[in-house]
Image (cartoon, rainbow, N blue to C red):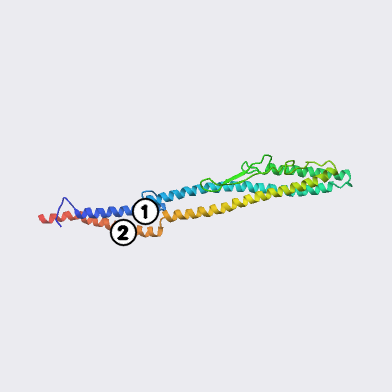
Amino acid sequence: MAFSVNTNVGAFVALQSLSKTNSQLGTVQNRINTGLKVSGAKDDGAVFAIAQNLRADLGGLSAVKNSLSRASSALDIGIAAAESISDLLIDLKSKAVAASDTGLDSASFSALASDFAAIVSQIGQVISGAEFNGTNLVKTAPDGVSAIANDDGTQTIAVTGTDLSVGSSQLSFAATIADATAAAAAVTQIETALGNVNTVLVNFGSGLSKIEAQQSFVGKLSDTIEIGIGNLVDADLARESANLQALQVRQQLGLQALSIANQAPSAVLALFR
């Protein structure tokens, strides 16, 4: 190799090697800092694009989860209200049957009629309180429930509400009983109403089962996609830790090699002594 003070080939080679080591070290440090081997398009454009599409799907599924949760809660309230109304109808039937006894004295009948009216009023209170996030499935002009079922919003699960107020088509009986004859007529009407409420419970329960099944599926799908994204872009931190140690040693050796190469031109001075 020729001696020259103008061109230090050894220093250039050592500098190139050190620059490469520093670049690799920066990549490893970035992976350790972010936990990702592909944190941007410059790392691997194709993999990053795939991961971004999967993240978009994951974001859509997050919205689906929220929609299903809201619908589930509204149906839980609707079912609780319908169950309470069903129990109250059973109590109403008991009062109406007792009040239909023509042998009752007026005081006893008045007490039963008063209890009957109180239970009817309680049904109204249950209905007015059966609201979640502005949705009431059992009020007059009831709301419905509709939940997004997939990540692009093209599929939904819908459950219609039903008016369960006293006097509606589902609970078609008088709010008060005036005499034993009216009480006897109310018994039949209440039995019909009880059957109608039970039908509503079946409808609400079936809708809730569908929503809960979809919630379970969406949860599993989200977990699978998240694992898939991790497989694509997550860094193996154990491997990166080992690489970091090796590159740090290479960096130190590169610095020493560059230092030695920079001292080479001074050897030319020996030729002029």
> Mark 1 sits on what residue?
29
> Mark 2 sits on what residue?
249
**Residue drawn at the location 63% of the way across and 47% of the way down:** 75
> Secondary structure beneath disc 1?
helix
Q: Residue 36 location in percent, x, y?
A: 41, 53
Q: How many marks?
A: 2
Left or right, 180 with respect to 151, comes to: right
Quadrant in which the N terminus is drawn: bottom left
Quadrant in which the C terminus is drawn: bottom left
Nearest to the observer: residue 135 or residue 150: 150
**Residue drawn at the location 30% of the way across and 55% of the way down:** 21
Q: Residue 248 location in percent, x, y?
A: 32, 57
Q: Residue 222 location in percent, x, y?
A: 51, 52
Residue 53 appearing in the image: yes
Mark 2: amino acid: Val
First in residue order: circle 2 vs circle 1: 1
Mark 1: amino acid: Gln
